[in-house]
Amino acid sequence: MAYKLTKERTRKIIEILKRTYPDVKTALHARNPLELLISTILSAQCTDERVNQVTATLFKQLRTAKDFAGVPLSRLEEMIRPTGYYRNKAKSIKACCQALLERHDGRVPDNMEALVQLPGIGRKTANVILGSAFGIPGIVVDTHVKRVSQRIGLTKENDPVKIEFDLMTLIPKKDWIDFSHQMIWHGRALCTARKPKCPECPLRERCDYGRKTI
């Protein structure tokens, strides 16, 4: 029989995640909101480790929205090539930074409405920026959060936005930022897409998926 989704069960899940991943934050290296925005765009279909390797050099040469908007497309493509899908990413970065210049004086806005109006920025990226750069609560739904949320029964949805709103109704707002990081780290460390490490998982007793695999 499947576990019922109750407030008590959700509270226990949050407590376990807090104990397991007590000091979590984004793995992307960024010193300011613009660097985090660029890094998050580059992280699509790429590991954070590879992104950090690329941005270590990139951010020494390009520092402002004006720099990114003005750099020749071919040069930017070459600089970010190791992250994959570099042509599309380069176009998104330049268009986004041009919009920042035109609409926000080159600054990254600190609200969801303005962020999602920028080229190449969806709710996931916006929530990363709001939480990690500005400390504004939001739930990031990436592939890890989606997978873990479905497996432990916090949502039955497949659409990331619907999953985000399901989680927002279950998780206290004060925990949204940390919960997102904890779920991402859990998805990377234990609840992997292939061969999840269910016997080692601290959530296994509250997870239908884990119970079936042990």
Image: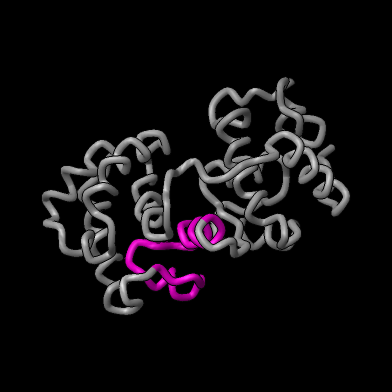
In the depicted structure, whether residue 53 falls above or below residue 106 = above
Quarter of the image for the N terminus: give it.
top right
Name the colour scheme.
one colour
- Name the residue located 37 percent from the left edge and 59 percent from the top edge: 34
Percent x, y of residue 31: 42, 52
Furthest-bottom residue in view?
103
Q: Nearer the viewer, residue 174 or 201?
A: 174
Does 193 sit above or below residue 8?
above
Q: Give the image location of residue 145, x and y in percent.
A: 59, 45
Q: Residue at x 53, y 55 (%)?
A: 132
Q: Is residue 21 left or right of residue 54?
A: right
Is residue 130 highlighted in magenta? yes
* Snapshot quadrant of residue 187: top right
Q: Residue 211, located in which quarter of the rendered image?
A: top right
Residue 120 coordinates in the image, percent (x, y): 34, 61
Q: Quadrant of the C terminus?
A: top right
Task: State left or right for residue 7 relative to residue 112.
Answer: right
Position of residue 112 measured from the top left corner of the image (x, y, whole percent): 51, 70
Report whether residue 183 is seen: no
Residue span colored magenta: 108-132
